[in-house]
Amino acid sequence: MNLAGEFAELAPELSRALENAGSLEELEELRIDFLGRKGRLAAIMAKLAKIPAGERPAAGQAANEAKEKLGELLGARKAAIEAEQEQKLLADFDPTMPGRAFWQGSLHPVTQVMEEICLIFQKLGFDIAYGPEVEIDRYNFEALNIPPDHPARDMQDTLYITENILLRTHTSPVQARTMLARRPPIAIVAPGKVYRRDSDLTHTPMFHQVEGLMVGQGITMANLRGVLLAFARAVFGEATSMRFRPSFFPFTEPSAEVDVSCMICKGKGAVNGKPCRVCKTTGWVEILGSGMVDPNVYKAVGYPETVSGFAFGMGVERIAMLKYGINDLRLFFQNDIRFLSQFGVDA
């Protein structure tokens, strides 16, 4: 049994087969045929156990040499095929053609509006303050003049984790935490996520708020109106008008809802002779709630009776909907690229 001769014949056979191999797939088939676990080399090596012991060293050396030679032939042909493919690609390449533009992401429209709101108030002298989204009852309710039996708790639709721990229903706890940590004068806005059990065209279980607080000496409703009017005109345009409507919030007294002139119909109540859908023909659109800080809040944080101040809070999604003319809040959270791409850098 001449195994050395059989090993030596493998290289010429592979060379002839490689001449017809024009792709990497065909090359892989040849590799399996010659060097695979059930290939030709393995079949010959299986015969080693049947030859005399004295002939095995020479046959083993021949097997190693054949395996090395087969690997070299396959490697050389692979390099040649890859070079041919590269040359073909280069021949088809036109360097004068414009390159492909990469898709550019951008900040979410809610994030853009929240940053715009914060920047406006920073220019008015407010600091940015942050707090935890998982809150305790003391900061979310009690320090804000909402005791355990207060009916306003039913209005909040709170998501409780335990009896005393909850997902904050507004960013007002940041105001309480700030007042406990700092003495007046204070001027802050608190942006962030808030959570309530609610979901429809205009409500989601998670949304964003920016709440503001200013406390010091001699601060009045006139200061509140001046700050909010400057904000409204910065967001919706210099022609924007504003009005206060009496309302109720547990942590402010007196309290007021704030409306601005409709940005769609310019306060006329109609567009091209048709009723305005945004303001429902009133010419006004509500944007936020506000008021003078209730004295009970000052007591809860240990502030003196001589201070005064105001607070306000707005839903960022609502401002974004009004700013961009969006009528369904859920569009902000569906991650539809067709919708989000409208708010890119160059949009």
Image (cartoon, rainbow, N blue to C red):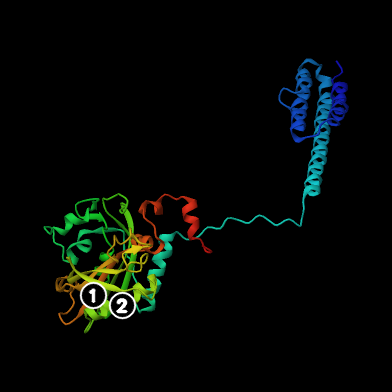
Residue linked to disc 1: 310
Which of these two is toward me, 105 or 24? 105
**Residue 237, percent across and down?**
39, 73
Checking the image for residue 160, the label placed there is none
Residue 73 x, y percent position in the rendering: 83, 35
Residue at (33, 70) in percent of width and height: 129
Give the label, 2 or 1, closer to the camera: 2
Q: Going from the N terminus, do you reach mark 2 or mark 1 first?
A: 2
Q: Amino acid at mark 1?
A: Phe
Amino acid at the residue labelled 2:
Val
Residue extending farthest to the bottom is 218
Above or below for 175 versus 28: below
Mark 2 and mark 1: span between their CA atoms?
A: 10 Å
Q: Position of residue 38 (x, y in %)?
A: 72, 22
Whether label 2 touches label 1, CB < 8 Å: yes
Mark 1 closeness class: few <14, some 14–19, many ≥20 residues within 10 Å:
many
- Identify residue for label 2: 227
